[in-house]
Amino acid sequence: MVELPKLLRDAAYIGVGFGVLAFQKAQVRRRELERLLAARCAPPATAEPEARPPTDAAP
């Protein structure tokens, strides 16, 4: 026969385990959303600065 204290302890461990998994999944989703929003809200990449012709300082 299964002892009640052992059964309750196992149930508590399982509950905590599911809680940890849910927290980790929420963290992953938050990071994905953060990356998505950063990509959408980021200013467009500017082109490289225009190349200026070299100036001759010597006469």
Image (cartoon, rainbow, N blue to C red):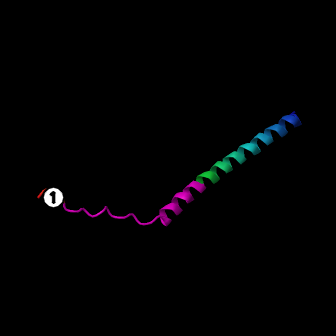
Quadrant in the rendering for residue 51: bottom left
In the image, what residue occupies the spot 23% across and 62% down? 52
Secondary structure at numbered mark 1: loop
Pick the front one: 52 or 11:
52
Q: Position of residue 34 (x, y in %)?
A: 55, 58
- Residue at 64%, 48% (x, y): give it: 24
- Magenta stretch, residue numbers: 29-53
Say whether residue 45 is magenta. Answer: yes
- The residue drawn where x is 82% and y is 37% is 9
Q: Quickly name the residue at label 1.
A: 56
Q: Residue furthest left?
A: 59
Image quadrant holding the C terminus, namely bottom left
Q: Is residue 12 above or below residue 31?
A: above
Q: Where does residue 28 sit, x and y in percent of width and height?
A: 59, 52
Q: How far across and how far down the image is residue 1, in percent?
A: 87, 33
Hey, what amino acid is under mark 1? Asp
Q: Is residue 8 left or right of residue 45?
A: right
Return the x and y of residue 38 as percentages of the image width and height: 51, 61
At x 75%, y 44%, the residue is: 16
From the viewer's perspective, is residue 23 above or below residue 36? above
